[in-house]
Image (cartoon, rainbow, N blue to C red):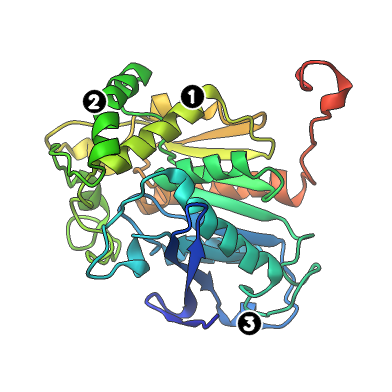
Amino acid sequence: MEWQTDILGTDFESCGFEARGRDGVARRATLVRHVPGSARQVGAPSRGAVLFLHGWSDYFFNAALAEFWTQQGFRFYALDMHNHGRNLHEDSTGGYVAHLDDYDAEISAAIGMIRSGEGGPSEAGSGEGGLGHPVPLTLMGHSTGGLVAALWVSRNPGSVQFLVLNSPWLEMHGSSLVRKAAQVVVSPMARLRPLTVLRLPERGFYYRSISSNAEGEWTVDEKYRPPLAFPLRAGWLSAVLGGHTRVARGLDIEVPILVLLSGASANGMIWRESMRHSDAVLDVNLMALRAMTLGRSVTLERVDGGLHDVFLSAAPVRDDAYARLARWIRGFIVDGGPPPTRDSSADGDGGRP
């Protein structure tokens, strides 16, 4: 592995790597780590590590999020997944994935790098000062990255100790009936011509609300996060719909989960001022319902005035979001101790009460 100064500046380093999936395909991803001066000290105490997964047609750019976790006493990492962000090149099919499980290998590889100490700024190894197995790991995901994170944790029990989801995309907009109807239309096309671009209305409202090139306050590189997102392809949509179906059936995740959502949605085909202080991408009430299917310990926080990424909202709103996250960290990670595990031998129905 070779770390180099990241595009976010001297407090960040990144390392590209390849991970081979179960299908035999090697895919390139990039692990980013926050390395401010204080975190470079060998043996610096740590409450654990955090790995962040971005949303679709996105990449990691929120330095303030990394700084927050570092200030809370955690080591912060972010993964630009394949066909996104720092991994894009001329021949990339931006944002495309044929099955959400295709992300598994790179997520597992990144966590392995963190767990082994290879991803740690101090290279300190295991124990309280390094990032060995005794130190808890939190997986955090935004939007589609939240969906990917939840599915990964459900398939890899015991691999991480906590899950934080920021406006996770857990269901198709509208209802499960809309999802099932879309699957009927998209599935044949996804099997025969998965790279077919679906001609759907394009909206740049969320980009307009966050980018300093539009009416937001955040520096967003349009090479990595285009204003109208990547082309929406049949195979990708089929993969997402399949993920939604698995969520609807219930994931039975054992670890504590925090779900942060805006207090309201503002959808539509024309710009409205309410989109400056609401989720202009997802139906947050539907996401709140789906959040309850994720596992046995789910905390739901509604952030009034929040954007689709609550940590990119206006300053007072994101302060509220960070305060809610900090409270959950204190309650579940710092003071809560390890989560209880289910003893399936206690009764005859898999441990359910």
Height in image: 295 above or below 87?
above
Whether residue 280 is visible, yes or no, is no
Query: Residue 200: where, in percent of width, then height?
Result: 15, 37
Front residue of this view, candidates 88 and 290? 88
Are the residues flagged by discs 2 and 3 in contact, CB closer than 8 Å? Answer: no
Query: Residue 204: where, in percent of width, then height?
Result: 18, 47
The residue at which mark 1 appears reads as: 248
SS assignment at label 2: helix
**Label 2 neighbourhood size at 10 Å, few (<14), some (14-19), many (20+)?**
few
Query: Residue 238: where, in percent of width, then height?
Result: 33, 35
Alpha carbon distance from label 2 to label 3? 52 Å
**Label 3 neighbourhood size at 10 Å, few (<14), some (14-19), many (20+)?**
some
The residue at which mark 2 appears reads as: 185
Height in image: 284 above or below 92?
above
Q: Nearer the viewer, mark 1 or mark 2?
A: 2
The amino acid beneath tag 3 is: Arg
Q: Find residue 184 and report its image quarter.
A: top left
SS assignment at label 1: helix
For marks 2 and 3 on the same chain, the one whose residue lies earlier in the sequence: 3
Q: Residue at x 42, y 51 (%)?
A: 311
Alpha carbon distance from label 3 to label 1? 43 Å
The residue at which mark 3 appears reads as: 40
Query: Residue 264: where, in percent of width, then height?
Result: 35, 31
Q: Residue at x 30, y 67 (%)?
A: 88
Where does the C terminus fall, quadrant-wise?
A: top right
Instruction: Determine whether, in the image, residue 288 is placed left or right of residue 345.
Output: left
SS assignment at label 3: helix
The amino acid beneath tag 2 is: Val
Q: Nearer the viewer, mark 2 or mark 3?
A: 2
Q: Residue at x 33, y 24 (%)?
A: 179
Q: How many marks?
A: 3
